[in-house]
Image (cartoon, rainbow, N blue to C red):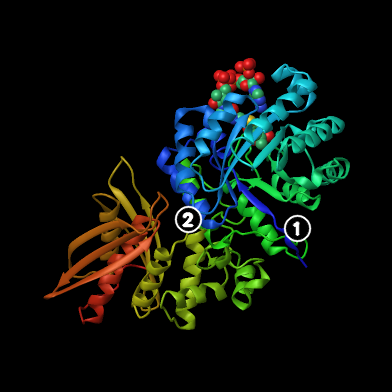
Amino acid sequence: MTSSTDRVVIFDTTLRDGEQCPGATMTFEEKLEVAALLDAMGVDIIEAGFPIASDGDFESVQEIARRTKNSVVCGLSRTALADIDRCGEAIRPARAKRIHTFISTSPLHMSAKLNMTPEEVLEASIAAVTRARQYTDDVEWSSEDGTRTEIDFLCRCVEAVIKAGATTVNIPDTVGYTTPQEYRGLFETVRARVPNSDKAVFSVHCHNDLGMAVANSLAGVQGGARQIECTINGIGERAGNAALEEIVMAIRTRADALPYTMGIDTTMLTRASKLVSAVTSFPVQYNKAIVGRNAFAHESGIHQHGMLKNPATYEIMLPEMVGLNKSSLVMGKHSGRHAFKDKLKAMGYELGDNALEDAFRRMKDLADRKKHVYDEDIEAIVDEEILTAHDRVKLVGLEVVAGTRGPQRATMQLDVDGRTVSAEAVGNGPVDATFNAIKALVPHEAELELYQVQAVTEGTDAQAEVSVRLAANGNAVTGRGADPDTLVASARAYLSAMNKLIARGVRVHATAAE
Ligand SMILES: CC(=O)SCCNC(=O)CCNC(=O)[C@H](O)C(C)(C)COP(=O)(O)OP(=O)(O)OC[C@H]1O[C@@H](n2cnc3c(N)ncnc32)[C@H](O)[C@@H]1OP(=O)(O)O
Ligand SMILES: CC(C)C(=O)C(=O)O
């Protein structure tokens, strides 16, 4: 059972902490686009930037404040009063606005960085919150490096800023140092010890230096925090922040263990991830939870078989929930016949058992040699299987010696009406040598009218698709062959055309020795 106190506020800081990671700078227009999407997605608070940082940041925060329809628009500021005034000015046009002011509270940061005593930090915090309240009733205070702060001092600060008017108290794990158990305990302790703690919402803000940002954030919520600060794709300082999509889907998927409600439309998560990746030029790692391209993809035959029977066997979330059309069963060296057959059916092919088995073997063989097997590769294999099912002349083997020292030489074995024959031939280049070997094995009058090569997909390991047109006695036929080896594809294409001629009654004889 959830109650209103179980509502978790999602505070997105992609445009502020997310943009702080090297290389992630976004333009004015890009920030507006991201903010509009976050607003539409149901993010409660958008931290739009740090207005004192630059005129550009000020202008983008101001424009986001003007345009945002639903979310609260927040600006960050140090405790310096000039920062707060600049921030107050930037967010002024917003329908709902927040000022977020922060200062370090750990002994290390206060002495080494700020050169301030704890008393001065406390006074600066009170003054900042008081000033911020002149602009808005919604004021957040953060204790930077909160997880390395002495607990007594932290509690004193929290009590004082709430008294001064802070409505949200954020205790960040600025350097990604804490552990889930410790962070949960920190919130439980502060909430229990600070007498006016019920007057503010507590917030988590976790960095991923030890890969625990999401786990720590959720533990903080279990300790009583009700705001989670996070970013799309987990971008942010150093190793990044807690990823919004992971937090949201963890709460949605494990409602039994994490019984909280949120206002996020999860079907927009994939779009948000793609947009942020595009505008920052930060690729999303393939195996990234929720939004990585492999998050709903299955290549292993045993998993694919399970998925075909019941997707719940290997998926704990429906892809539709995060805005994907469906899961994908990717063909590769680990795939099985069930998935291959299903793939062919989806592509509109129905093969007999033997042709299916042959096509499956060729797909596995291709996957052993090629990184990705695309639908186009499968199409090329299957088309060839269908077309060559009744061929009288089939390629058995081909070895070609090519290079700068000609003539190039091809050694070929063919199956002609069930008999294996072989020959060697030279030529002006490896393709010529290959075709001469065919002519030596199956003499014929046909003339080569066209030889064309193109890649089926991208990359140097792509399959070559070769077209060969042969003409004889007024008949012109075109054959096609596909293989990552262009010469094998060429031989297949030539044989495919030749088999068509044979089917039309052009006489050919196998003459070479076995
Ligand atoms: C954990 C976080 O993510 S905190 C946010 C970090 N984000 C950023 O820093 C991005 C935006 N920052 C900036 O554009 C610049 O750092 C500015 C405009 C804020 C300040 O620039 P500068 O005036 O050139 O100062 P600089 O960045 O070199 O040093 C920081 C100054 O702020 C002070 N400071 C740092 N944090 C705080 C704080 N929370 N409250 C008050 N003062 C602070 C430092 O003591 C130092 O003061 P000093 O100049 O008197 O020595
Ligand atoms: C400003 C604060 C919230 C911050 O970004 C951090 O401590 O990491």
Image coordinates for residue 491, horizontal then vertical, percent: 32, 62
Q: Nearer the viewer, residue 442 or 165?
A: 165
Q: For the point 73% across and 31% down, which residue is it?
A: 145
- Of tags 2 and 1, the one toward the viewer is 1
Give the image quarter of residue 435. bottom left
| Above or below 319: residue 26 | above
Q: Nearer the viewer, residue 115 or 165?
A: 165
| Above or below 87: residue 407 | below
Q: Nearer the viewer, residue 67 or 398?
A: 67
The quadrant where ligand 1 appears is top right
Give the image quarter of residue 176. top right
Q: Residue tagged by mark 1?
A: 5
Image coordinates for residue 80, horizontal then vertical, percent: 63, 24
Q: Nearer the viewer, residue 276 or 376?
A: 276
- Asked whether, in this view, residue 89 is left or right of residue 495, the answer is right
Q: Residue tagged by mark 2?
A: 370
Answer whether residue 212 is visible to the viewer in this image: no
- Asked whether, in this view, residue 458 is left or right of residue 168, the answer is left
Q: Amino acid at mark 1?
A: Thr
Determine whether label 2 and label 1 are within 8 Å by CB: no
Answer whether residue 107 is visible to the viewer in this image: yes
- The kind of secondary structure element at disc 2 is loop
